[in-house]
Image (cartoon, grey):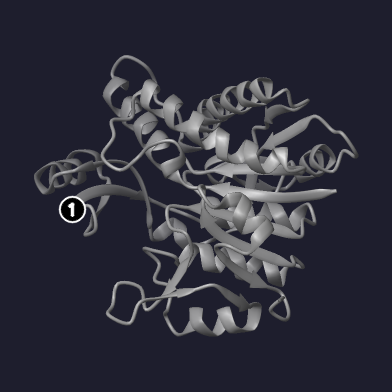
Amino acid sequence: MKTAVVAIGGNALLRSGEKPTQENQMRNVATTAKGLADLIERGYDIVLTHGNGPQVGDILLRNEIAKSEIPPMGMDVCDAESQGQIGYMLQQALTSEFLARKLEKVAVALITQVIVDENDPAFKNPTKPIGKYFSAQEARHLEKEKGWVMVHDKKRGGWRRVVPSPNPIGIVEYKPVRRLVFGGERQAEVVIACGGGGIPVVRRGDRYHGVEAVVDKDLAASMLAVSIKERLFVMVTDVDHVFLDFGTINQRPFMSSTKNEIKRLYSEGQFPPGTMGPKILAAIRFLEGGGEEVIICSLQNLVQAVEAGAGTHIYGDAIRA
């Protein structure tokens, strides 16, 4: 069997500057589904994960606007809402694409909980941007009126709300995910799991409890891949490959590496938190957890990256020819 965990970024649903309408998101998801179906048509069974930053931010904002009339839900429930929303969009687009190609496949979205540590320091230091961009004046108003923590995004010139992003330490539903993706020859299911980084929960005794946070989707996807004992982890982003010295006159493509080399480069600060950092950290954790290969590539190059060496490849041991 050829299998992989594939994590897609936020641009799979919304392009930069687009309004978060249902029509825009469904159109973008249809394009994403074509790229993913190209890989699946080549014989790959995948577990698909996705981000939820804009969507969960919009859900939380609706909560705030309507709270005088409707009791607001906690952030964990909002994470679940976004997981269902995006899961439905991907599920419909993928299954429609399979139908058009006469592939005996069906996409299945699984509501997934991700375990975090209740004492994670991230709860006291919000860093995960969610929702829409605001002007400086709007950001100051929201900080004062709602108590939100706002940060400035220099790249896009706006302000966004940030929330806690604790480290994922386990996946509650990893066993059914593994059973679905490794179902055997001619299996039908294409699994969508850990959407938006999963729903963050903590374990207290013999009960799970949702918490106010959003988990990084690449770190959650890495944890999921380790949990189901997957060997290949692919992160699809808006660039064709990783760069070294990104944004400087010395910027250059970085096409292949090993776990030890990428750990050294990461510790030297080559991959800042606001750019490629979380993806490289997710790659390191996957390889340290027993994974064999990580690929970072664009959607357009997905098949070429998996089968013909495009994109950036990071291996657990020696670089392969």
**What is the secondary structure assignment of the residue under circle 1?**
loop
Q: Which residue is mark 1?
A: 157
Q: Quadrant of residue 130?
A: top left
Compared with residue 230, is residue 49 higher up or lower down, i.e. above or below?
A: above
- Residue 184 rendering spot, x and y as whole percentages: 90, 39
**Front position in the image: 82 or 319:** 319
Q: Residue at x 50, y 48 (%)?
A: 300
User: In the image, 161: left or right of 111?
Assistant: left
Does any portion of residue 116 appear in the rendered image? no
Residue 186 percent coordinates (x, y): 87, 34
Q: Quadrant of the rendered structure where residue 56 is?
A: top left
| Residue type for callout 1 | Gly
Q: Residue at x 39, y 22 (%)?
A: 22
Q: Quadrant of the C terminus?
A: bottom right
Q: Position of residue 299 (x, y in %)?
A: 52, 47
Q: Residue at x 37, y 27 (%)?
A: 24
Point out the residue furthest to the left here.
137
Q: Residue at x 72, y 22 (%)?
A: 102
Locate residue 289 relative to residue 235 in the image: left or right: right
Question: In this view of the protein, which residue sits in the foreground, 130 or 14?
Answer: 14
| Residue 43 found in image quarter | top right
Q: Nearer the viewer, residue 39 or 134?
A: 39
Q: Is residue 151 left or right of residue 201?
A: left
Answer few, some or many: residues within 10 Å of disc 1's Cα (few below 14, many 20 plus, some between 14 and 19).
few
Residue extending farthest right: 185
Residue 144, compared with residue 226, is above or below; it is above
Q: Could you tell me residue 153's position as x and y percent?
A: 24, 56
